[in-house]
Amino acid sequence: MLFPEEPVRCLTKRDDWLIDRYYPPARRNTALDVFDDRIPAPKELIAEVDRAYFRQSLQNEVDEWFKRRGFDPDGLTIPKHPFEAVFQADFGQLPPEPVKPLVEKGAAKAKPRKPTTPAKKPKKTQRTRLISLMEEIGLAKSGLLLHEVREKVRPQFQKTHRGLKLPADSTIDRAYGKYASATDTSAE
């Protein structure tokens, strides 16, 4: 189990502190440990101490593998080609390399394009139907009161839009307000 699920990494300061302070949870205090000033881990920390010792054992195992193959695990770098040759000899494959995108200096990163979809026709609402009906009737600057506009629009709406529910008074009022304000500003 050279490369387990847990990534092999350097021990953290917390791991070092736990290992220096507590002995492994599975170990019993024996008479040979006279000079060992570590103590048993409290119940709350047993899992964390166990993980710290596990990470230490993984690190030690990896360090030993490097030493057996003639590499210095404490060195700053390891030669790539000899390492790949030894790794392939031991494991039959090269270690996976992270793929980095090539970006030239000063080049802008391309943004992914959004898929283009054909523009949908806007859905006709009752208000838009009413406004187009008011244009047909010619209610612009008619000087009619709202209840008179409703009386003129309702029968026309029922004729042209059979099967649709008759709009509420407030919808007719809002549509007329929008229609009247649009025609008033364009007429000036």
Image (spheres, rainbow, N blue to C red):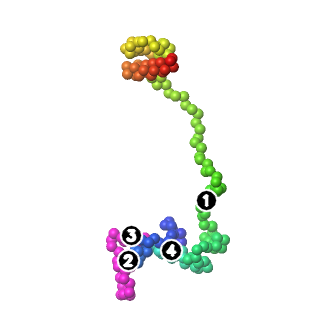
Q: Earlier in the sequence, mark 2 or mark 3?
A: 2
Label 3 Cα neighbours within 10 Å, binned few <14 / some 14-19 / many ≥20: few
Q: Residue furthest front?
A: 188
Q: Earlier in the sequence, mark 2 or mark 4?
A: 2
Label 4 Cα neighbours within 10 Å, binned few <14 / some 14-19 / many ≥20: some
Residue at the disc numbered 3: 47
Residue drawn at x 58%, y 42% as measured from the top left: 114
Q: Earlier in the sequence, mark 4 or mark 3?
A: 3
Label 2 Cα neighbours within 10 Å, binned few <14 / some 14-19 / many ≥20: many
Circles 2 and 1: CB distance less than 8 Å? no
Q: Is residue 160 visible?
A: no
Residue at the disc numbered 4: 59
Which of the two discs, 3 and 1, sits closer to the camera? 1
Q: Earlier in the sequence, mark 3 or mark 1?
A: 3
Q: Which mark is residue 99?
A: 1
- First to last magenta residue range: 25-52
Report the amino acid beneath label 4.
Gln
Residue drawn at x 42%, y 12% as measured from the top left: 143
Residue at the disc numbered 2: 22
Q: Residue furthest left?
A: 43
Tag 2 secondary structure: loop
Task: Using the image, determine if residue 98 lies above or below residue 136.
Answer: below
